[in-house]
Image (cartoon, grey):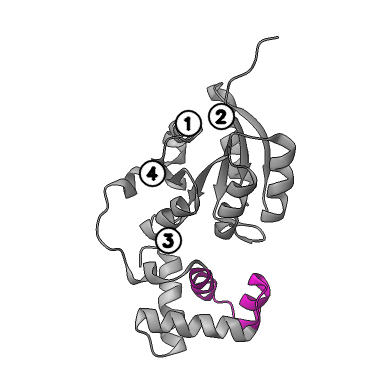
Amino acid sequence: MAIDHRPRVLIADDHQLLRMGLGQMLAADGGFVVVGECETCAQLEPLLGQHDPDVLILDLQLRDGSALERIAPLIAAFPHLAILVLSMHDQRVYAERCLKLGAKGYLMKEEAATLITSAIRAVADGKTFLSPTLAGTTGDGPPIGRLSDRELQVFELTGDGLPTRVIATRLELSEKTVEAHKANIKKKLGIEHGTELARLAMSWRESGGKA
């Protein structure tokens, strides 16, 4: 029996329609095998162990939280796995963090329809793929880039309008720790008051990470 050399793909996204659309697109292409899909971080590792895909299409925001902190552990557990991050954020700070953590590619969702097959083939071949809207950007980046990964998570959830106690529960931290992160964020961004932090964070989220 002939060996199927087509890249095996697992899709992790919290939107069912997007998962279905990507699956149908890849099936129609004929050059890939979609081995599974999921919508939460908790489902990721069991499915990866079960299906052993070559490529993981990973949305940064899954149903049970941010997948950013899962990238490095997944690469450590599955060294051959190529992670292609699919995100609504076109801010270079996200792309740089993902690649630094071990992801092989970063693609904007709005570009997925035309570039997803090229992106998957590139990362499956061991190459790095960066969304064209980001590939030509230069400079030191916005002040948001100074935040640590955890601080960025707190900043994002603040931008979603969540209070400290809910952020603490979501990230499995104490409220005191969340407040400490907020204090560090304000210091790094040159902000004095919590209301100003909330306003900036909401603007950042509403703009898709461009503010």
Q: Is residue 188 left or right of residue 109?
A: left
Q: Which mark is residue 130?
A: 4
Q: In the picture shown, does residue 66 fall above or below 202? A: above
Residue 165 position within the rendered picture, expressed as x and y whole percent measured from the top left = 65, 82
Give the mark nearer the N terminus: 1 vs 3.
1
Q: In the picture shown, does residue 74 fall above or below 82? A: below
Q: Is residue 88 left or right of residue 165?
A: left
**Inter-mark Cα distance, 1 to 2:** 7 Å
Q: What is the span of residues highlighted in magenta in the rendered image?
A: 150-174
**Inter-mark Cα distance, 1 to 3:** 24 Å
- Residue closest to the eye, 49 or 164: 49
Give the mark nearer the N terminus: 3 vs 4.
4
Report the residue marked by disc 3. 208
Given the image, on which type of amino acid does mark 2 rest?
Leu
Q: Which mark is residue 117?
A: 1
Q: Is residue 120 visible?
A: yes
**Inter-mark Cα distance, 4 to 1:** 13 Å
* Image point (31%, 46%), residue name: 135
Secondary structure found at label 1? helix
Residue 192 position within the rendered picture, expressed as x and y whole percent measured from the top left = 39, 90
Report the residue marked by disc 2. 26
- Counting every numbered tag in the picture gives 4
- Contact, mark 1 vs mark 2 (Cβ under 8 Å): yes
Residue 21 position within the rendered picture, expressed as x and y whole percent measured from the top left = 58, 37
